[in-house]
Image: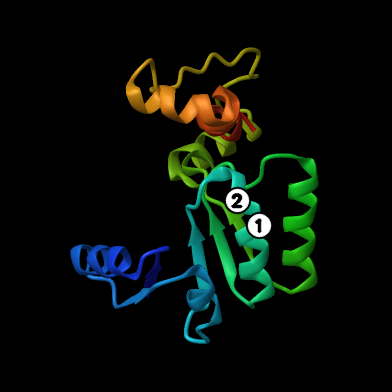
Amino acid sequence: VGLASLQKSEAEAACKDWGIEKAYGSFEDLLADPAVDAVYNVLPAGVRCYWTVKAILAGKHVLSETPSVMNGWEAVAAQRAAEDHGRVLLEGTHPTCHPVTKRVRQMILEGKIGKVEHIDLSMPVGHSLQGKMVCSKTGALMGVGVHGVAIIR
């Protein structure tokens, strides 16, 4: 397990705090390490697809923070890279992978809780500093709304 940062000293400090084995002073160094099989991409949304594709081309599987891409072109590029190189690319939307969500979906499909006619969903990020920061960079839908779309889907 390793952690990369633009400053190796920052990576080393984070590794020490979190008990992570190896610090890298660049993303390229992490991707070049044959001992790394997969990466969790939490880079800013504007560069996330670029580094996801670079990781796939380096032979790594990728778990990406949301949103994994910013538009349809990026979605196609990331998907094609993963398919063409036989790598797993997964967007880490918590609701999609949560056991409760899976169970509710199963119950709906089995007709156990009736027909879905309307969905009313509230997101817990209001007008806090974090909410303003996230939504001002990507818009509400790309910032936190992606989780709502994922749970509805």
Instruction: Calculate the distance from the C-alpha at mark 1 to the C-alpha at mark 2.
Output: 5 Å
Instruction: Please tell me whether residue 81 is drawn above or below residue 121 in the rendered image.
Output: below
Residue 20 rendering spot, x and y as whole percentages: 28, 71
For the residue pair 84 and 41, the one nearer the viewer reads as: 41
Residue 77 rendering spot, x and y as whole percentages: 78, 56
For the residue pair 27 and 97, the one nearer the viewer reads as: 27
Residue 33: mark: none
Instruction: Please tell me whether residue 131 is drawn above or below residue 98 in the rendered image.
Output: above
- Please, what secondary structure does the residue beneath circle 1 have? helix
For the residue pair 26 and 34, the one nearer the viewer reads as: 26
Quarter of the picture containing the N terminus is bottom left
Q: Are marks 1 and 2 in contact (CB under 8 Å)?
A: yes
Residue 31 rendering spot, x and y as whole percentages: 54, 75
Residue pictured at 63% horizontal, 28% vertical:
111
Q: Amino acid at mark 1?
A: Tyr
Quarter of the picture containing the C terminus is top right
Instruction: Please tell me whether residue 102 is drawn above or below residue 52 in the rendered image.
Output: above
Residue at label 1? 50
- Please, what secondary structure does the residue beneath circle 2 have? helix
Q: Is residue 65 left or right of residue 87?
A: left
Residue at label 2? 47
Q: Amino acid at mark 2?
A: Val
